[in-house]
Amino acid sequence: MASEGPLYLGFDLSTQQLKAIVVDSDLQTVAQAKVDFDADFKATYHITHGVHHRDSTGEVYAPVAMWVESLDLVLKRLKDAMPVPMSRIRGVSGSGQQHGSVYWNEHAEKILGGLKPSEDLVGQIKGALANEWSPNWQDQSTQKECDAFDAELGDREALAEVTGSGAHHRFTGPQIMRQRKVKPDMYKASTRISLISSFLASLFLGDIAPLDISDVCGMNLWDMKTQTWSDGLLKLTAGSQDDAEILKKKLGEPRSDGGASFGTVCNYFVDKHGFSKECQVISFTGDNPATILALPLRPLDAIVSLGTSTTFLMNTPKYKPDGSYHFFNHPTTEGHYMFMLCYKNGGLAREKIRDQLPKPENGATGWENFNDAAVQTPPLGVASKEDRAKLGLYFYLRETVPNIRAGNFRFTAAQDGSDLRREEAGFEAKTDARIIVESQALSMRLRSQNLVHAPDAAGKLPAQPRRIYLVGGGSLNPAIAEIMGSVLGGCEGVYKLDVGGSACALGGAYKALWALERKGGETFDELIGKRWKEEGAIEKVDVGFRDGVYQQYGNVLGAFEEMEKRLLAEEKE
């Protein structure tokens, strides 16, 4: 049973589900509900895994109406699951899949401001949309636009210096640029453009909500140094200087305070779903920024999400951009940033290597077989002083970090990292089981090394993260946890973060709580840190830093980087 105090509601609008979770002031979960798009709406919207694909163009897109219909349904399910009235909810926030855009028409503000509780939400909102579809983050149709973005400021590194990222197919700026070209009438008819996070906030607010200060960084349009729209990139996207001013109005100005209230929920949600008229709508953010709000993540702590893709996240005060990774404004802490690496070849690649191992005996699973091979193989496959270190890249899809073609590439080097050689003969299958996990961790360590420092006051320990938090399906695997800790370090250990598969929604709920209960400039991490209890939320699964082994991996970082450079150079030949 919830305490007598206020409650806070967080959402996560992901590719395949809409989740909702309610917490109390002590961060205890009160109720949760979800809608699975394929299970609940496949017959209506004909989607697969939440989206439509057009293979001829590389387009991937989702029906906006499905999200709207899901909101009514998830709130009905939440109300049924709540042990107390919905009117106890004091604030609502949440997250949306990053980069996707929603195009409103000239009637949008009038329709949002006059939503009728006697009618379903979806039937009303359809009349407010200039585009019934929203580009999805899996879309790959914008290569020409990405090339233009990378060239606009000089090169890809210059674009990353300004916007925090090089150009990516999924980023909203290139997507808007393409929509303007292929759907000129739709683009002209759109009067406002929301990100998915601000779209969801707009529904609750009954008005067009401002963009979030962190989510706006996933567009290739926001100047990170000046914290304003980039005039040159707006002009590129819109086609001319005059049109750039129009685009700026369509986007609106982001709200700089991640804890700002936009106002109270509109009457539709009061009358239809039982919300209080005083319930506040707090800025919604992107799903990745929301993930780092699911716990008090200190600088030097890192989250590794081990799902189908692999994501590495850190909270850092340092802004050191590069074209191969991402910097976003931190969603709640001004002057801090979210550092993000996102790999396509995560769980899928590990499964492919698992399946190449001999079939397990005695009823063992394929993963038990994989784990035995991985932990029985010594670090870098080095069993003696004479052995060469084994390195590899295992890409079953074209990777973005770095941008290397699909293929399995194996190399060896001297143990000090010198004398890098291509290993055409390959490795034994059981060796691959360890090398693939090491490879993924080495890439993270290589790209995050400038953001870490010695975690102890005396500076006796080598630079490394303080803690590593693992989330996602791979976090349950003890062999992966051990190898991640060996490569990445973590002087306080490696932990499995258990938030029931709802990290993004939980981060949204915590964001609403912080926004409405903070006092005297109290930061998110200060407030949540006081109330967050490790018991039941995290479990230590590995010691992390291993003196000697950590340095052994450090010796080959240069060789690992050289391996990537050689493969990149081959593609240019």
Image (tube, rainbow, N blue to C red):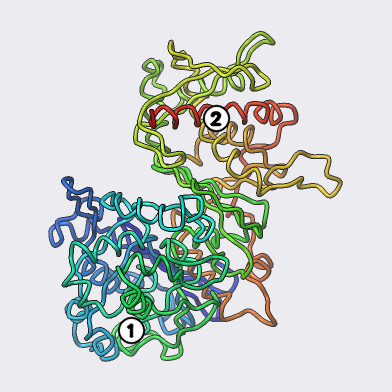
Cα–Cα gap, marks 2 and 1: 49 Å
Q: Say which residue label 1 marks.
A: 269
Q: Residue at x 64, y 22 (%)?
A: 417
Q: Residue at x 59, y 38 (%)?
A: 446
Which label sits in the foreground, 2 or 1?
A: 2
Q: Say which residue label 2 marks.
A: 438
Residue 568 in which image quadrant: top left
Could you tell me residue 73's position as x and y percent? 26, 70
Between 352 and 246, the residue placed more toward the observer is: 246
Q: Residue at x 49, y 48 (%)?
A: 323
Could you tell me residue 379's position as x and y percent? 61, 22
Which residue is outermost to the top? 386
Q: Is 418 displayed left or right of 234 in the figure? A: right
SS category of the residue bearing label 2: helix
Q: Are marks 2 and 1 in contact (CB under 8 Å)?
A: no
Q: Residue at x 29, y 73 (%)?
A: 76
Residue 547 in which image quadrant: top right
Residue 247 visible in the snapshot = yes
Q: Is 550 displayed left or right of 330 in the figure? A: right
Mark 1: amino acid: Phe
Image quarter in which the C terminus is found: top left
Q: Is 420 displayed left or right of 106 in the figure? A: right
Mark 2: amino acid: Glu
Between 362 and 417, the residue placed more toward the observer is: 417
Could you tell me residue 372's position as x and y percent? 51, 21
Residue 520 in which image quadrant: bottom right
Which residue is outermost to the right? 458
SS category of the residue bearing label 1: helix
